Image (cartoon, rainbow, N blue to C red):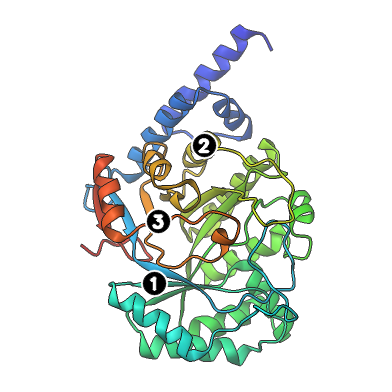
């Protein structure tokens, strides 16, 4: 294609974005090649359009965050993902399953700082039966009714269905009845099976990941969606991932937020050259434009650091994620940023926005 034709194509795609039109895969590839600042400005335009009516019309001024805690109830896992430095087998001396007392201590500490959500995830433990999970959920609901359980990932649910000998729908229904409030988008990585077969061959495939979300949304559970990129995938496969999420959202409307982050390589078996912050900002901006039906995008300061997390607010993000008083998975791969509530609010103010604490469903709490 000649330079003149490329210019015409680029102008056509930019115009479509500014008019609020839906872009396709070819358009996304064109946008990806724009200068980073120009792509960021387009993403900010789309953020403003998406948030214009939110929070009583104050959406463009507001950046939200949540006070929660990651609790990994076990580190025993039998899928051995190449990008994971967290998992252990039952033969490892440092494997664990949290006791009820240990869980309560963590939730007591979360309650003390005003927490409203626990991100409850673990490995694929082959020896835990359904009663372990149902009793844990019922216990949290009874003792900590102010804390929403944002729990388990689609790969975990596929693991549960296999271990329990139950259908996915029955497992999710039972978990919801016991106290599950929403589902995180973990284990999404890249929703292309060529990639999944290379980095996590024992984990559920992309169709099964999406099936969990379809069922959960049908049952009234909201969820987030994620993408972990910067390893063995191509740009076209990243865009295919976004397309599959958008199609799912068109059908069920249950994704409340999208979060992307870059592969963290330390202590993992996956050999891939890590990508930098500019690539992270580029993909987040492209995601905001492509995912025109998912209202909220989180800044991934946990992997990128506070300053890039702050910059991400100008590249399509409207949410600063979580205080995350505990994080065990990404930190094992060499990244361990921590921020208190006051620090998050200061970063948001410095970027020119009004910080507001939210709950799981993006309702403002202050």
Q: Are marks 3 and 1 in contact (CB under 8 Å)?
A: no
Q: Nearer the viewer, mark 2 or mark 3?
A: 3
Q: Position of residue 265 (x, y in %)?
A: 65, 50
Q: How far apart are marks 2 and 1 (CA)?
A: 29 Å
Residue 319 vertical position relative to residue 211 in the rendered view, above or below:
above
Q: Distance between the residues labelled 2 and 3?
A: 19 Å
Name the secondary structure under disc 1: strand
Residue in view at x 79 percent, y 53 percent: 198
Instruction: Tell whether 363 sits left or right of 86.
Output: left
Q: Position of residue 136 (x, y in %)?
A: 51, 88
Image mark for residue 286: 2
Instruction: Tell whether 157 sits left or right of 336.
Output: right
Which quarter of the rendered picture does the C terminus lie within? bottom left
Residue in front for this viewpoint, 182 or 107: 107
Q: Nearer the viewer, mark 2 or mark 1?
A: 1
Name the secondary structure under disc 3: strand
Instruction: Tell whether 288 sits left or right of 79.
Output: left
Q: Mark 1 points at which residue?
A: 117
Give the mark nearer the N terminus: 2 vs 1.
Answer: 1
Give the mark nearer the N terminus: 3 vs 1.
Answer: 1
Q: Position of residue 266 (x, y in %)?
A: 64, 53
Q: Where is residue 147 in the image (x, y as percent from the top left)?
A: 36, 77
Residue 42 vertical position relative to residue 337 in the rendered view, above or below:
above
Residue in view at x 71 percent, y 44 percent: 272
Q: Name the residue under label 3.
A: 321
Q: Can residue 78 be seen in this view?
A: yes
Q: How crowded is mark 2: few (under 14 residues within 10 Å), some or many (20 or more)?
A: many
Residue 69 falls in image quadrant: bottom left
């Amino acid at each position: 294609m000649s330079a003149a034709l490329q210019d015409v194509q680029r102008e056509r795609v930019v115009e479509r974005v500014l008019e609020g039109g839906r872009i396709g895969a070819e358009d996304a590839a064109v946008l990806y090649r724009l200068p980073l600042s120009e792509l960021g400005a387009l993403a900010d335009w789309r953020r403003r359009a998406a948030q214009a009516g939110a929070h009583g019309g104050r959406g463009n001024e507001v950046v939200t965050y949540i006070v929660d805690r990651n609790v990994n109830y076990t580190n025993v896992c039998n899928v051995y993902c190449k990008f994971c430095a967290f998992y252990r087998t039952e033969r490892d001396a440092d494997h664990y399953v949290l006791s009820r007392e240990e869980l309560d201590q963590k939730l007591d500490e979360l309650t003390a700082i005003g927490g409203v959500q626990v991100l409850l995830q673990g490995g694929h433990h082959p020896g835990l039966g359904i009663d372990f999970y149902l009793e844990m959920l019922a216990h949290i609901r009874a003792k900590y009714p102010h804390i929403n359980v944002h729990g388990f990932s689609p790969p975990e649910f596929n693991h549960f269905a296999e271990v329990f000998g139950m259908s996915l729908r029955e497992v999710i229904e039972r978990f919801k009845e016991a106290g599950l409030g929403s589902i995180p988008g973990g284990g999404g990585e890249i929703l292309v099976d060529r990639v999944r077969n290379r980095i996590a061959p024992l984990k559920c495939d992309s169709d099964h990941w999406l099936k969990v979300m379809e069922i959960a949304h049908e049952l009234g559970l909201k969820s987030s969606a994620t993408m972990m990129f910067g390893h063995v995938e191509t740009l076209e496969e990243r865009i295919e991932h976004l397309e599959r999420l958008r199609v799912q959202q068109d059908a069920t409307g249950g994704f409340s937020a999208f979060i992307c982050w870059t592969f963290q390589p330390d202590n993992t078996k996956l050999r891939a050259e890590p990508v930098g912050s500019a690539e992270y900002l580029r993909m987040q901006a492209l995601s905001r434009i492509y995912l025109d039906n998912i209202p909220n995008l989180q800044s991934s300061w946990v992997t990128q650091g506070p300053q890039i997390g702050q910059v991400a607010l100008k590249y399509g993000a409207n949410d600063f994620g979580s205080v995350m008083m505990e994080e065990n998975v990404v930190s094992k791969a060499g990244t361990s940023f921590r921020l208190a509530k006051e620090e998050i609010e200061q970063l948001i103010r410095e970027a020119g926005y009004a910080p507001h604490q939210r709950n799981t469903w993006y309702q403002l709490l202050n």
